[in-house]
Amino acid sequence: MTTSPTSPINVKHLIGGDWRPASDGATFETHDPHDGTLLGTIARGTADDGAEAITVARRTFDEGGWSQMSPKERAKILHQVADAVDAHRDELAMLETRDGGKTITQSLHAEIPRVAHNLRFFADYVSMAANEAYPDGDLLSYVLYPPAGVVSAISPWNAPLMLATWKIAPALAFGNTVVLKPAPQTPLTANRFAEIALEAGLPPGVLNVVHGFGGEAVAGPLTSDPRVDRITFTGSSATGVKILQAAAANHTPVSAEMGGKSANIVFDDADLDVAVPMSLRAIFGGNGQVCLSGTRLLVQNSIREKFLERFTEEARKLVVGDPKEASSFMGPLIEQRHLEKVHGYVELAQEEGGKVITGGERLTGDAYANGFYYPPTIITGLDNTSRTAREEIFGPVETVIGFDTEEEALRITNDSPYGLAGILFTENLNRAHRLAARWKAGTVWINTFFERDLRLPFGGEGISGLGREGGQYSREFFTEPRAVTIRL
Ligand code: NAD
């Protein structure tokens, strides 16, 4: 049984094992996007709070209790934390669903299990990873991977704890200390996770969590303080630029996972029993608030009509409703401002000459009365030069574009400032491999979507990303690889 918070939670910063209010006492609120219920009152962090968390993370790192601990010992503690996440799965899932509007099915069966998997994967990776040694005559060279130091982790609201632990888990496993700043829209699971981690044996000061906003506020020092050794950021490309600028002053390495405008190509030889449901999931799953979404649906003209008819019919059947209900496929969008942005793009699409063939208006009526509900929306009649097809909408809005040849599909696909992911449906595997090799994207899925093996590099090209994380790629980022050569 899932449980739900019954009264608003008072969320403070976690700094060095202490729960602290903002230095000036300020707070902000987080509400349930389904019905507006007040869920929590959150410490609104100041720049001083950010700097204090860095001081504690720095001191904890330099004292060596965590950073010098053997990887096996660290792994043992991270496994304990993962076990505790499993034990609190129902509670964390409901918290995630209420704070961000994600369906309970997604929270319970995908995201919170992935939180535990992130922790276990990196705990094990550190001791299992192969290392390099190069004997050369009387010289022996090898590589050490000491932790980088203090890591700032800045995460978005669309997959709150899954993405936060995608940063925390490798950072901690490799021996760093962390200051996490979750998105202000969804602070609750990070706060609860930090409590659970402390109870499960994570030493104080190793993971610090501060809440609030970017820029001049709490996140300022996280990106501009010279005592920070790494910044791992997931969020929009516009914020990414600001973070890169702030980090450049101190030469602080940044790993940035940013926005997307991925193509989903359906060829006329695709198995439509796979392509239709996968394509629906690729754009409407997570309410379209997924960086990897297949937001440009490229359909070969020879099957365009047939495919669209089926795709639209199925899209209309998707259940949009209270995310706490197991029957809901989509919940509310994150907030009013975001709903206005999404709808603004639908209006823009029409101004650009597009035709809305389903959806396109905010959902109203009793079931949606106080929530930010938007239906699956499909737009045709635009080409890849339109702003609708070029800019990230981050909502359940699909832009359908026709094509005739493989070359044309590839040209349209790669004609984007983004380069995060790509999805392809075809039974011609030669063609699939040909396209994957020339696709401007960090990840390409063929006849599937959203599968993630954490050993693979994850990241994007163009304005979608800088650097890769996952397996050995995370090791390179969260450590300071050192070459050692000895004359024997
Ligand atoms: P956002 O950029 O508005 O915020 C992300 C985080 O950055 C938040 O914690 C925010 O408070 C913080 N922030 C904002 N300004 C800052 C500043 N100047 N300095 C430091 N921190 C600052 O993004 P969002 O709206 O929370 O998330 C949606 C975006 O994230 C979309 O563009 C989506 O594509 C992207 N995203 C990318 C991936 C990926 O893996 N590539 C995954 C999920 C989401």
Image (cartoon, rainbow, N blue to C red):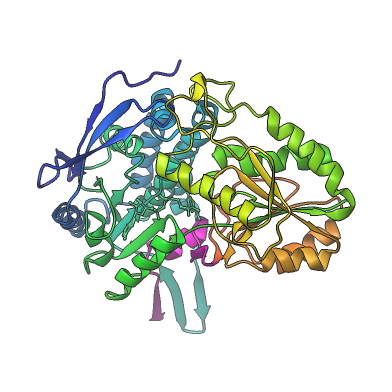
Looking at this view, is 72 or 426 the one in front? 426
Residue, far top: 1
Image spot of residue 167 (x, y percent): 40, 51
Instruction: Verify whether residue 466 appears in magenta.
Output: yes
Where residue 192 sits, quadrant-wise, is top left
The correct choice, above or below, for 410 with respect to 50 in the image is below
- Is residue 353 left or right of 23 when viewed as pictured? right
Provide the residue span drawn in magenta: 462-488
Total numbered labels placed on residues in the image: 0
Looking at this view, is 60 or 414 the one in front? 414
Instruction: Verify whether residue 303 appears in magenta.
Output: no
The correct choice, above or below, for 337 with respect to 216 in the image is above
- Is residue 259 left or right of 436 when viewed as pictured? left
Residue 214 in view: yes
- Where in the image, quadrant-wise, is ligand 1 located? bottom left
- Is residue 376 left or right of 38 when viewed as pictured? right
- Is residue 6 left or right of 304 when viewed as pictured? left
Q: Residue at x 52, y 49 (%)?
A: 344
Q: Quarter holding the C terminus?
A: bottom left
Image spot of residue 480 (x, y percent): 36, 68
Q: Residue at x 46, y 24 (%)?
A: 369
Q: Residue at x 51, y 84 (%)?
A: 137
